Image (cartoon, coloured by chain):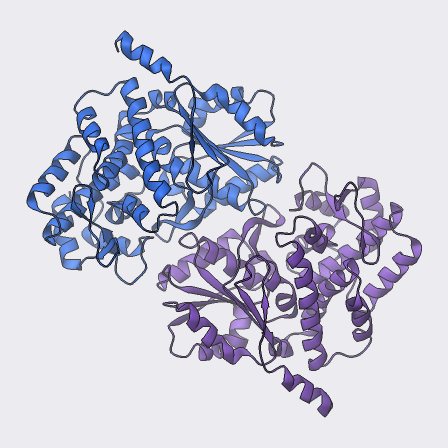
Chain colours: A purple, B blue
Amino acid sequence: MNSNKVLKLKHYNRSDAYESCLSPSKPIYFGHNILHHLESHVATLNPDKVFIITDTNVAKLYGDTIKAQLLNRPNHLVTFNAGDQNKTLQTIETLAEKVLEAGCSKNSLILNLGGGLAMNLGGMLASLLYRGIRFIHVPTNFIGQTDVVLSNKQGVNTFGGKNLLGMYSSPEFSLVDTSFLQTESKRSKFAGIAESMKNALILKSDFYAYMKKVLKSSINDVDMHELAKKTFEQKLSICKRDPTEKQLGLSLEYGHTIGHAIEILSKGDLLHGEAVYIGMHISAEIALQLGIMNQSDFKEHQAFLKSIKISSKIPKSITMDKILIAIQKDNKKTGSQPAFILLKGLGELHQIGGQLQTMVPKKIIEDCIRPYLS
Amino acid sequence: MNSNKVLKLKHYNRSDAYESCLSPSKPIYFGHNILHHLESHVATLNPDKVFIITDTNVAKLYGDTIKAQLLNRPNHLVTFNAGDQNKTLQTIETLAEKVLEAGCSKNSLILNLGGGLAMNLGGMLASLLYRGIRFIHVPTNFIGQTDVVLSNKQGVNTFGGKNLLGMYSSPEFSLVDTSFLQTESKRSKFAGIAESMKNALILKSDFYAYMKKVLKSSINDVDMHELAKKTFEQKLSICKRDPTEKQLGLSLEYGHTIGHAIEILSKGDLLHGEAVYIGMHISAEIALQLGIMNQSDFKEHQAFLKSIKISSKIPKSITMDKILIAIQKDNKKTGSQPAFILLKGLGELHQIGGQLQTMVPKKIIEDCIRPYLS
């Protein structure tokens, strides 16, 4: 890292505040080394106690750091086991009992520390406790900081389907400190970046060009901060136009019909972004086969995806039959058939009669999945 | 029943529509023999499927009746076991899996048939499925028709506390047909009427005088319809003034601090209204001891309660210690001490600094509970 870059990074040692989508009064503070602002923001909410909800891994890494920030304010660390297989109502129940045991009242605050799992579980927990108490997000990984923090969707999996139970609900504020990313594994970061690539593909803009460039170089801490910030800002621009993801926002589900299916079938082996990455490959194949996307766009689409080192192979344990059953459980589903978000070209969404979701014949889905099976 | 009464009852064979509290656009249809209106109201929502959520007892009594009303509309009966001990997240999970298995989509409709348990469980289930699908209430017992149908509160118990997890959420419409009451047991009706007596006590009015009169006679079907309708209208008037029960609406929790505690400790032996009935007796003792209520009002309060045949004795299995622990888990709780709604006089709420909740010394709580132990 050269000194110029160090200077640039120092510049971020302050907090930019963004308006969140569903509730403009609920800010998102974004910056590098801004964790020391946490207590002053919490103080404005004046909770009787703070409950830090996090997984056992993040608790080891950052539990003490967060507790130190909260000074003498009463607080408790409440943990769950990492892994998407724990994203269940059962975990919500266990967490509820733990925080109630520790004296959680209607005036308490839930602080969700970690990745999407901590935010989704803690957000849902808070939204149900006493019919809704206040919560805040402190995301520590790339996907949490750039994607989940903007979603306003809390929830858990059930019946073999992702996020089938949940609600829309906004944190009082979120604090995104990109210095957390320094301890994130490359694999986890890359999986997060796959989601950024998805957003770059559905809304091709300067951001797409920026991503193409940045993925060619080895990514240092300054790059990570900038990449996170730019990804965050691009998703925010989409969310603002459709906060509950009914129309344009649905495009954010690109790659997710197959992605969610193989993510849940992998039982924790695949990270969310890795599964969506494979889902995007297959979605482009479907668009090509249906004649929706032309050969040249298809090539650019796949080449862009290949600029990041993630495997496009579906794990061996996952069979074609299992995938076909699992995509029936997609939470976008409104009719009897699974629906796909498809691209006409890079940055161009395919629509029929104003609908972003396309029903795809089973035969074509199978043909397009087959090359990606292990 | 004399012919005059029969004529009067026939008059009710029509539907009066009331505006619900949280969402004026979501009506409550109230009448006698109005079930044949169900399908036409459902038709306006145009769901792809209807899922009837009910307990196994109500399913036997009225499952076929409701299915017959829905004509050729795709519908499924989905049951759970009766009893407040089944008001859990685990039941929500099981119900979710059953309706998803049967093809529930975002366009489906949940129809909650039965008492408060069916309405609370089904309302919470619908509010969580796909982050919220539409639901309707068809209450079949007195407390469901006069109390729960107006609450907009969905939820389950956890950690030994009543309704600690849930949300505010309104049905698209409710259909209250008092002809269902003809099959309700006397015990269950009386428990429901105890809640009406509570409302009569907190907001003494013509309704209080009416209740005093009606409880002196043997109650026939016409009386039951009128009693249900008057109870419903009185609670509606309170809810309209405070839909989320933050202030005045909190008064509806009269008798509930002790009531909820002994209800959950009885593990299904006491009906909700029976537990609240005991709770009101004890609340009056507390108000008397604290010098908040005078002797004359206290006597009238207890005499009024005794005009219905419900036991004021706490079941043998429930000890003083268990109650003192359980009231710590009250969902009104905002501080470290349990809080009580107390009456200054009949129809007069006790307030300190605008607060309806009064902290009561443990010693006084114990003294007032003791006479009611078995």
Residue A143, horizontal then vertical, whole percent: 65, 66
Is A17 on the left-hand or right-hand side of B58?
right
A218 vs A269, nearest the viewer: A218
Quarter of the image containing the N terminus of chain B?
top left
Name the quadrant containing residue A214: bottom right
- Single out the residue that lies furthest toward the right: A296
Is A167 on the left-hand or right-hand side of A6?
left
Is B142 on the left-hand or right-hand side of B201?
right
Residue occupying the point 58% across, 26% down: B43
Q: Is residue A28 above or below residue A255?
A: below
Residue A19, horizontal then vertical, whole percent: 58, 65
B258 vs B223, nearest the viewer: B223
Report if residue A270 is visible in the image: no
Report if residue B334 is visible in the image: yes
- Single out the residue that lies furthest toward the left: B295
Residue A234, horizontal then vertical, whole percent: 70, 65
- Single out the residue that lies furthest toward the bottom: A3
B249 vs A200, nearest the viewer: B249
